Amino acid sequence: MLADVLRWRAEGQEMARLTVIRAKGSTPREEGAFMLLTRTEQSGTIGGGRLEWDCMAEARALLASGGEAVERHIPLGPAINQCCGGAVTIRMERVSDPEALEAELHADREKLPQLLLFGAGHVGRALARSLALLPLRLVWVDAREEEFGIVPPGVEALVTEQWEPLVQGAPAGSGVLVLTQSHTLDAVITGAALERGDLRYVGMIGSRTKRKRFESAFRQIDIPQERIDRLVCPIGDFGVRDKRPEVIATFVTAEIAARMLCEADSPQVSESAISDTNNVTSPRDPVVRLCGTRAEFQHFSSITES
């Protein structure tokens, strides 16, 4: 939605906002949900169906006439051929302060859970397109600039080899998804994420054989077993053996939506885990613990890539 508003502002298009200000009973969207539209485009939804269609027509008429805001109380029943059974009140108004709207959308985005996506290969590109549709702050990371291709709107692409500060600096409750071109790099990023203990999702692409090999390596560097057990690998494992990137991305996106957006599925983060994370003295500390010397790194590499 933010990307649409930025583009509409640049094009000088007028906008209208439709907001669910009251919702009673069974309704397709909750109070506070809103959508935006211009005379020819729309972004977001207040629930779809005849409800949305009629409100959009009235809002566009309001844009054309320059009229004042209006509110409509709409029972979701036979009169509009919707059988939800509840009722909503929709406020329709012209956007008089686009800058304030942009600031509001920026603030809303900052409240979203963050997901760090490491890897811009075939599956990474498919995942970036798919995950961009979710209400997440998606940060996409790879050192190979040429691999990104077209970055989806709303996705922050970072060309960097400095993954450690990103993992260490992610807010508690964030997610980390690892699918780089190197098994060793997969291992050290995943290990650093597991060491934190306060992330909502840690996923790594790979087979069950790869998982077993990595689990052994993680135990050798003293990552607690309960944290290793929270690793999701294979990712998107719904029993479908189609390995096309777009198919993998579909199932992984569903998995992440369930784990990161549904409060009932969110793991409880202990105060001690958060405290342990806050006591790390520098962004490189997790890497020092994982492979503090070149010899240790080579040993780790031999375990994960042999």
Image (spheres, rainbow, N blue to C red):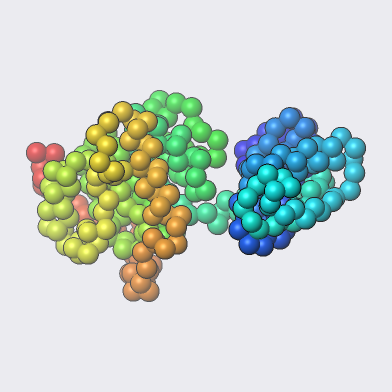
Give me the residue at 74% from left, 47% from top.
79
Give me the residue at 40% from left, 45% from top.
254
Task: Return the residue found at the far front.
Answer: 78
- Where residue 105 appears, as percent x and y from the top left, is 64, 49
Q: Is residue 182 left or right of residue 154?
A: left
| Front residue (pair 187, 286) | 187
Number of marks present in the image shown: 0
Give me the residue at 75% from left, 35% from top.
38
Q: Quadrant of residue 89?
A: bottom right
Is residue 105 something that shows in the picture? no
Give me the residue at 37% from left, 31% from top.
246
- Where residue 167 appears, as percent x and y from the top left, is 37, 52
Is residue 67 something that shows in the picture? yes
- The quadrant of the picture occupied by the N terminus is top right
Q: Is residue 112 left or right of residue 165?
A: right
- Where residue 195 appears, as percent x and y from the top left, is 27, 60
Residue 25 vertical position relative to residue 142 in the rendered view, above or below: below
Q: Quadrant of residue 108?
A: bottom right
- The quadrant of the picture occupied by the C terminus is top left
Q: Quadrant of residue 65?
A: top right
- Where residue 245 appears, as percent x and y from the top left, is 33, 30
| Front residue (pair 72, 132) | 72
| Front residue (pair 54, 93) | 54
